[in-house]
Image (spheres, rainbow, N blue to C red):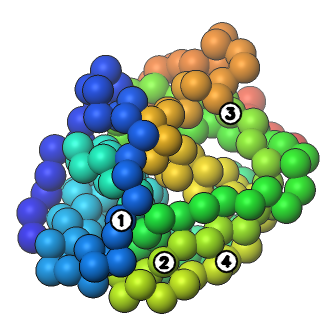
Amino acid sequence: MAVRKIIRMGHPVLRTVARPLAPDEIGSDELHRLVADMIDTLHDYGGIGLAAPQVAEPIRLAIVELPGGPSRYGELPRVPLTAFVNPEIEVLDPATAGYWEGCLSVPGLRGFVARPQHIRVRALDLSGEPIEMVFEGFPATVFQHEFVHLDGKLYVDRMTDSSKLVFDEEFERYILPVEAEPSA
Ligand code: NI
């Protein structure tokens, strides 16, 4: 296992549509090694999700780990560390809500993005078995953020107001104190 380098916005792999994994690749040692590296990388950089293209592997694979518990978005469900192979999202309710998103491939910045808040995720696990999960609220945003990496997109592409793209430091200083007020 090893920590891999996370590539940053501007690297062409982040703008490549990733290819699906074939059935014979899903149980392979190579894929398990890659996932182990991605887990080490996620934990080393600190984050809640990582898509394979972010370590320069243009394949349809992402890992997500949500610690759960209280947050500024209220009480969040825990999502144990899970690998999602060839994931797909079905929007169950198109009503959106916005969050300040960050991305390990866009370090130092945050942007406000509105996304649907009720989705179904279908994917395969590392044994090739189907996974089906339904998420509401912030976790729905997390999965959409991770999985659009597989289509060569970044959260900045989903922004509708570029005045809400800010540096982390300024976010903490000017925006967080206001956003900390409870809101819908
Ligand atoms: Ni990201």
Q: Residues within 10 Å of mark 4 (few under 14, many from 20)?
A: few
Q: Are marks 1 and 2 in contact (CB under 8 Å)?
A: yes
Q: Give the amino acid at mark 1.
A: Leu
Q: Residues within 10 Å of mark 1 (few under 14, many from 20)?
A: some
Q: Locate residue 80 relative to residue 53 in the image: left or right.
A: right
Mark 4 sits on what residue? Answer: 133
Question: Could you say whether the residue bearing mark 1 is in a helix, strand or loop?
Answer: loop
Q: Give the amino acid at mark 2.
A: Leu
Q: Locate residue 149 relative to residue 123 in the image: left or right.
A: left
Residue 173 screen position, x and y as percent: 55, 24
Residue 38 screen position, x and y as percent: 25, 62
Nearer to the camera, 23 or 31 = 23
Question: Could you say whether the residue bearing mark 3 is in a helix, strand or loop?
Answer: strand
Look at the picture and state if 45 lies above or below 135: above
Nearer to the camera, 119 or 44 = 119
Which mark is nearer the camera, 1 or 2?
A: 1
Mark 1 sits on what residue? Answer: 21
Q: Is residue 107 visible?
A: no
Q: CA distance from mark 3 to mark 2?
A: 27 Å
Q: Give the amino acid at mark 3.
A: Val
Q: CA distance from mark 1 to mark 2?
A: 10 Å
Q: In terms of sequence position, does the residue under pointer 1 or pointer 2 come before the other?
A: 1
Residue at 24% over, 36% down: 7
Q: CA distance from mark 3 to mark 1?
A: 29 Å
Mark 2 sits on what residue? Answer: 124
Residue at 26% over, 74% down: 25
Q: CA distance from mark 4 to mark 3?
A: 22 Å
Q: Give the amino acid at mark 4.
A: Met
Q: Locate residue 129 relative to residue 127 in the image: left or right.
A: right
Mark 3 sits on what residue? Answer: 113
Residue 2 screen position, x and y as percent: 9, 63
